[in-house]
Image: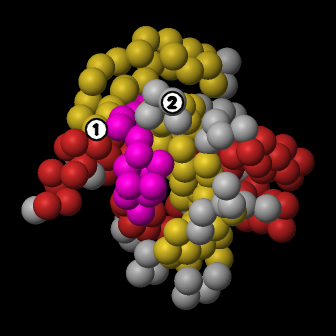
Amino acid sequence: MNFPILETKRLKLIEITHQHVDSIYEVLSLEEVTRFYGTNRFTLPIEASRLIDMFHKNFHEKKGIRWGIKVKENQKIIGTVGLNALHINNKRAEIGYELHPTFWRMGYASEAIKEVLAFSFKQLHLYRLGAVVFPENEASINLLMKLGFEQEGLLRGYIHQNEEFHDTCVLSLLQSDWKKSQEN
């Protein structure tokens, strides 16, 4: 399968390559981005390079798809969005995303996620999309719930980050609920 390029009104979701190392590093080196990300902030560009390698490996092994979020207006990569823990046979995956804080609260995350949801349910024929979110990350929980996700519960001590264990909320969206929301 060729890497799927997705497009919205303001965004192009593209394959992340090593030419995007600086953009990925710029986003993931910020404490305000990674504090709810499940990993420590990057301190060296090589960490962004390794992450890009992991994205490629996951795509080729059909374990995930991660897009770079590019703003059409200025051609700038402002973050990533994608599917983790992709299980084609079980028709499920987990959605993940992050944006540079300069672009928070402008509707870009929502726009990108909506396109990934459509791709996941229509093209990949997934039935369930999950999300694992820190309870303190109210902005992300609210965004997902606006998009139709429902909170399912709490995973205690699920993520180890910055030498601490953190609880996470689990949310999900089923294809049947997504389809109903598209009819309205």
Q: For this rendering, which residue is in front, 105 or 76?
A: 76
User: What type is the residue that disc 1 sits on?
Assistant: Leu
Give the residue at x 50% y 12%: 157
Position in image of residue 52 (x %, y %): 78, 50
Quadrant containing the N terminus is bottom right
Residue 41 placement, left or right of 5: right
Residue 139 makes an appearance in the image: no
Tell whether 154 sits left or right of 158: left
Residue type of the residue flagged with mark 2: Asn
Q: Nearer the viewer, mark 1 or mark 2?
A: 2
Residue 90, how many percent across, how many down? 46, 27
Who's the residue at 69% across and 46% down the image?
Answer: 59
**Residue 181 position in % (x across, y down):** 17, 54
- First-in-chain label (1 vs 2): 2
Instruction: Assess disc 1: are there few (<14), some (14-19) or many (≥20) residues with their C-alpha within 10 Å of its C-alpha.
Output: some
Q: The residue tagged with tag 1: helix, strand or loop? A: strand
Q: Is residue 35 found left or right of 47 in the rendered image?
A: left
Q: Residue furthest bottom?
A: 73
Q: Secondary structure at mark 2?
A: loop
Q: Kindly check if marks 1 and 2 are in contact, taking CB atoms under 8 A apart as contact.
A: no
The residues tagged by marks 1 and 2 sit, at their Cα atoms, a distance apart of: 16 Å
Circle 1 is placed at which residue position? Answer: 174
Crowd class of label 2 (few under 14; some 14 to 19; many from 20; radius 10 Å):
few
* Residue 145 is a magenta residue: no
Q: Residue at x 84, y 61 (%)?
A: 18
Q: Which residues are magenta?
A: 115-137
The residue under label 2 is 89
Q: Nearer the viewer, residue 115 or 176?
A: 176
